[in-house]
Image (spheres, rainbow, N blue to C red):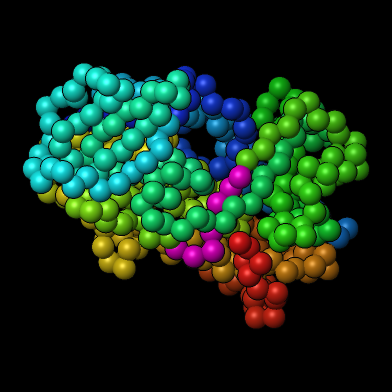
Amino acid sequence: MKLAREGVRVRVYEVATAIDPARRTLIVTDKFREQMGLFADDAIVNEIRVFELFANGSQASVELDRPDLIIERADLIKVLAKEAMAEGAEIITGRRLVDLKAHTLDTDRSPPSAYSSEQDGADARTRGAIQLTFKGSNPAETFVTMADTVIGADGAFSVVAQCAGWPRQPTVSLMQAIVELPDDMSPESTRVWFELEDTPYFYWLIPEGSGRGGLGLIADEKPDGKNPQEALKSFMEKQGLKAMEFQAAKIPLYLKWIPVHRRVGAGDVYLVGDAAGQVKVSTVGGIVTGFRGAQGVADELLHSNGARSGQTEVGRSGSFLTSRASILADNAGSNAEIRALRRELDLHLGIRRAMHDFNSADYGRLLGLLSNSAKSQLGRFHRDEAWRLMTHLVLRQPRLLSLGIRNFLFGGGFGDSVK
């Protein structure tokens, strides 16, 4: 939206034949409101004011100063598409990216004034440093276009990343069931259980309104980890809950910073969001961080020479902008947003490494260490401002630091078994 708003011509390529994505409820911090502005309410279905935490017979409740937000993924994608078009972007559906490579036949890469008409199965630009090939809804259809800059926003299994030479990133499985909320549960409360026999992460139950909620978990990334669907069904039985439907996804597993920029021939390729693994590995949440990655790349392009007069093609099959920008500075980014995002993701990686080999007694001890002062800090700062949260939390309860350091130093090595 920002690129189109700033006068860049934008074309969005969507692999589906219509903007009708699968539904899945997600929980985000109120940072989402800041990012989305007036459009946030179109995707929000509920607000969470209390977290109830359970581990090894211990329990703790944390009241949030700023409520977390429950959003519906399908509604979010639809509102983004609607507002992008309102800003002047074009959305082209039924286009699946199958190839991206340097275009070497043309040395004049000034942006063309219009697309050529489709002839012989090709919708081809005559100028551009990078050639992109799409398949249509009919497998026999092939469409070709050119661009000087490509932004891959096409998810954990990014074709843009694969074609441009990035290694495939590891993923973990998310499994969620839609259930009726227990009678004793407030619609403004989220429950979190640490059940180490099933997952090194946690179970969650997040109300989405109308007496329903999403009960889910992140699977163990180890090859011999418990099957997430079987674990979820067993946990539902223990809680006396029944599934109305199941939802599943593969989520990138952040193990180190993924460079966001590469050169392909004379062109530039960028990755944002899940395609770049921009996911908080402590909680495996990626909406806010993905938006931050996209913001950083957009800022870089808009503030580079020639971007305003360029032409962008953005999409879940890949995003493409005619400009000559590049993000340098050890590929962490030459702007503040990208650098800050890398620091945030690395901190969440440190938190996950410190906690990943906790046992049930460790989590019970952790909840026991949450004094009223410590819980007030958990409620004051959210997980998208982790540096401030951790600083204030340790100052209020220093013993939390010693518990984390012990597991960080002597744990089993988070991510070592991931392929």
Q: Is residue 255 magenta?
A: yes
From the top left corner, tell me how far across and down residue 154 is, in percent. Answer: 44, 40
The tally of labels here is 0
Q: Residue at the location (65% across, 81% down)?
A: 409
Q: Nearer the viewer, residue 21 or 133?
A: 133
Q: Is residue 159 left or right of residue 411?
A: left
Q: Is residue 6 magenta?
A: no
Q: Is residue 196 above or below residue 177?
A: below
Principal secondary structure, stretch drawn in magenta: loop
Q: Is residue 50 left or right of residue 339?
A: right
Q: Residue at the location (19% across, 24% down)?
A: 115
From the top left corner, tell me how far across and down residue 287 is, in percent. Answer: 50, 43
Q: Which quadrant, please, contains the N terminus?
A: top left
Q: Is residue 253 left or right of residue 181?
A: left
Q: Nearer the viewer, residue 76 or 191?
A: 76
Q: Residue at the location (39% across, 49% down)?
A: 163
From the top left corner, tell me how far across and down residue 276 is, in percent. Answer: 44, 52
Q: Which residues are magenta?
A: 250-257
Q: Is residue 101 above or below residue 7?
A: below
Q: Nearer the viewer, residue 368 or 181?
A: 181
Q: Is residue 293 left or right of residue 124?
A: right
The quarter of the displayed image where residue 56 is located:
bottom right
Q: Is residue 38 visible?
A: no
Q: Which quadrant, please, contains the C terminus?
A: bottom right
Q: Residue at the location (32% across, 28% down)?
A: 143
